[in-house]
Image (cartoon, rainbow, N blue to C red):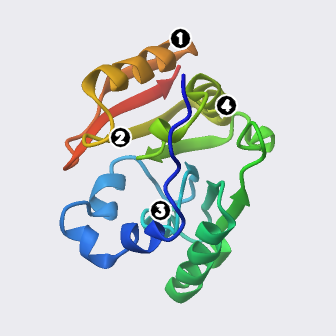
Amino acid sequence: MTAHVVCPWWIGHLLAHPLRRVWQDPAEILRPFVTEGMTVLEPGCGMGFFTIDLAQLVGPHGRVIAIDIQPRMLAGLGRRARRAGVADRIDARLARPGGLGTDDLDGRVGFCLAFAMVHELTDPGRFLSEIHHALEPGGRMLVAEPRGHVTETAFAVTLDLAAAVGFAVKPGPAIRFSRTAVLSRA
């Protein structure tokens, strides 16, 4: 699979803009998947459009592991998390070359959000395998890809890769401008 262009850090400001909540409300999207006290993984977190709401949903005893490949995205997330009063619930990590660096999470994550980022990966099969290992039995992953960037055929390829690493694949919730699926670890 060929490498796709990674979203430039400066677009992170636009993606985290509050106006986006009009068509993609993070709390509404995430509430069915996240419970208080849960450990949540968010690869490709950017500047934290979903991360802040994830941290609020997991509550003071939960934890959000937010991973990105761009230090400037994580710096923006840090500023937003401090302003929202949830920085202590977020473990912001810079992805390692060739992987997420989630070996310490094997079997401990209840939910993973992969929003508009799988199409940027050079090896989505490896990524899905890493997530599968990080999820606890019964853990779920919401995959949402932008319709404007990801064709139905390309999304089907991603879901086939997910099934190949052991995920049960089900249709996801309706999210405006997105193709979605819910992946579960048996």
Element assignment for label 3: helix
Which circle, 1 or 3, is nearer the viewer? 1
Image coordinates of residue 105 in percent, x first then y, are 74, 42
Q: Residues within 10 Å of mark 2 (few under 14, many from 20)?
A: many
Q: Amino acid at mark 2?
A: Glu
Q: Is 6 on the left-hand or right-hand side of 179?
A: right
Say which element carries label 2. Answer: strand
Q: Choose mark 4 or mark 2, whichever is in front.
A: 2
Q: Which residue is mark 3?
A: 54
- In this view, the residue in front, 77 or 168, is 77
Q: Which residue is mark 1?
A: 164
Amino acid residing under circle 3: Leu
Specify the amino acid type for callout 1: Ala
Q: Badge 1, how many Cα within 10 Å: few under 14, some, many 20+? A: few
Q: Position of residue 23 (x, y in %)?
A: 19, 62
Report the mark closest to the observer, 3 or 4: 4
Report the amino acid beneath label 4.
Answer: Glu
Report the disc number at residue 130.
4
Tag on residue 145? Answer: 2
Separation of disc 3 and disc 4 at Cα? 21 Å
CA gap between label 2 and label 3 equals: 19 Å
Marked residue nearer the N-terminal end (2 or 3): 3
